[in-house]
Amino acid sequence: MYYDEETIENVRAANDIVDVVGTYVQLRRSGANYFGLCPFHNEKSGSFSVNKNMQIYKCFGCGESGNVFGFVQKYENVSFPESVRILAERAGISLPEPDYTPEERLRVSKKDIIAKINKEAATFYYRLLRSPEGEAAHKYLTDRGLSEETINKFGLGYAGHYTDGLYKYLRSQGHSVEELQITGLFNISEKGVYDKFWNRVMFPIMDIRNRVIAFGGRIMGSAENVAKYLNSPETDLFSKSENLYGLNLAKHSREKFIILAEGYMDVIALHQGGFNNAVASLGTSLTERQARKLTTYTDNIVISYDSDGAGTKAALRAIPILKNVGLSVKILNMSPYKDPDEFIKAIGADEYRKRIESAAQAFDFEAGVLEKSHDFENVDEKTKFDHEIAETIAKIDDPMARYNHVEAAARKYNIDASALRDEVNKIGSRMKAEETNAKAKEAQKASREKKAEEGDTQRARLLLNTITQNKNAYECVKDVLTEQDFGSGIEPAVYIQIRSEYDKMGLAVGARIVEKFTDAEEQSKVADILMTSLEEDMNESERRKAFADLVIGVKKSAIERRIDEAKQAQRGEELVKLFKEEKDLDALRKKLMTADI
């Protein structure tokens, strides 16, 4: 959906960014800005800043920045048009519903196109499951113990016998081949267009706003050289590393924990068993982005992966990822059953809840896995285990918890407590030294990057910020500066927009300048530029000198770049002109030092 500039500006003006962000983040005022804990990364000190005057935000920890639309897009994981709709609804503004022409359709974002087609595809699969063609697939689901209520709750469907059924249906609904191509639902080659999913039970994957963002499909029967489970590829709407199956339902649970399972059927079986707080990663190992998303809804995770070797390895990989984002982790023992679906079918949901209540702490689970992999009757194996358990304990951050685990492990595994404590301390010292060295290298790298940033780009950004907030400063330089003076990055485009704002509106509003850039990454960069400001505690003379230094620095760097280019191209007349411009900078500095800014 496309909205004109006037509509977008009306919605933005009706939604003060401090008020909007304040509904998601607890903010406190400090000077001209408001600060809080960043909702986009894990931090203990508030580095997330919101500027009321500029109507933009920036996190000085992770670098995220933007205007009010950008914040809603990032936090809610929605497209730009959706962020406009959310904020319009918040402000009580009615939005136009334009009729699409073929030309207008081209302006609709890829995400909106994919979401619309996915919804139609889900409806197609849903209806087909309930048709004579889907009888075998429907029987497969009921034979797996799923009720009609559960099948409907998860919107399960069937991709039919034909390899072009969905394609023909969507084409009949008016969608072009170009639109269908970006959904990931089709294989397109010189031989034609074919459905990616056919003869499969279909699992719609939904985001937290209940949009169908992708699909998973299980093959019916058996077929050689065909994957049992097949997932949609990544698209502009779908990222496997970010989304979790079932989170759209689990986020409404009143439980104080979330169950993390492995597959679609595990989640579905758990929900049917009364555990509406179950989710699963999507055919990949758990990622930090998925773990961080879970922190929005809970502080506690119960891992319920398969009880086989692969499930154990997956749990061991997941534990540090979950703990690193601040989640408390327990691991459920389903032995002798393989997965939640099998467990609940065999002995019921009540027994499964008992297993949750007795779930092992992360350390106890890790220690138990180590114990099973060593023969304690063998001295060398026992010694190796003792060293490995010491290394596991050394990774615990809390000193008191580390001490208690030393005492408990010493008793349980017949290890001398003093020797174990010494080994833990030795490993801890080594790990701390390695961490210190790593941080030192990162600091050196950051220092080098900071020095580079303090050069041409930093001066350009400070100048752009200054002339955006200070009309008198802009008036002093509008006939002196050109977009070419701001280098080759995004800064020249920002300067063009600043000039346009002053010419059209008589003032430059930071949030409106950000809106002129449609790409989310560009919007973030522009907001970052407009949050790069001079020190606030300067007196008038110091501020005038700082402004003059910025203008001269930007002009001088631009002239030097052009001189180098002219020398390489041997353009003599241009060199003479540039040398004169460089000499004239002294007069410009004197003029700026007396300017009223």
Image (tube, rainbow, N blue to C red):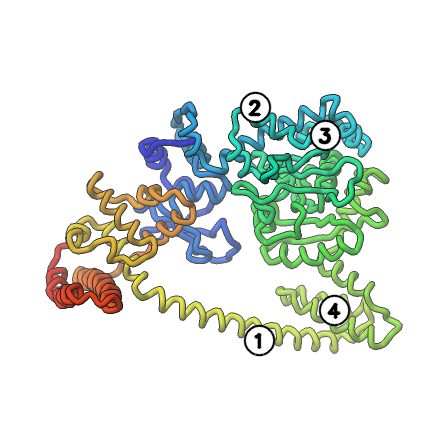
Nearer the observer: mark 3 or 1; the answer is: 3
Q: Residues within 10 Å of mark 1 (few under 14, many from 20)?
A: few
Q: Which residue is mark 1?
A: 433
The first of marks 3 and 4 along the sequence is 3
Three-letter amino acid code at disc 2?
Answer: Ser
Between 109 and 363, which is closer to the camera in this rendering? Answer: 109
Nearer the observer: mark 3 or 4; the answer is: 3
Q: Which residue is mark 2?
A: 172
Q: Which residue sits at x=19%, y=51%?
A: 474
Q: Which residue sits at x=38%, y=66%?
A: 450
Snapshot quadrant of residue 446:
bottom left
Between 291 and 204, which is closer to the camera in this rendering? Answer: 204
Spatial separation of the CA atoms under disc 3 and disc 4: 54 Å
The answer, for residue 254, to whether it is visible in the render is no
Nearer the observer: mark 2 or 4; the answer is: 2
Q: Secondary structure at mark 4?
A: helix
Q: Residues within 10 Å of mark 4 (few under 14, many from 20)?
A: many
Q: Position of residue 262 (x, y in %)?
A: 71, 46
Decide: marks 2, 4 in contact (CB < 8 A)? no
Nearer the observer: mark 1 or 2; the answer is: 2
Q: Which mark is residue 161?
A: 3
Is residue 155 positioned above or below 506 on the image?
above
Q: Which residue is mark 4?
A: 389
Q: How many marks?
A: 4
Q: Secondary structure at mark 2?
A: helix
Three-letter amino acid code at disc 4?
Answer: Ile
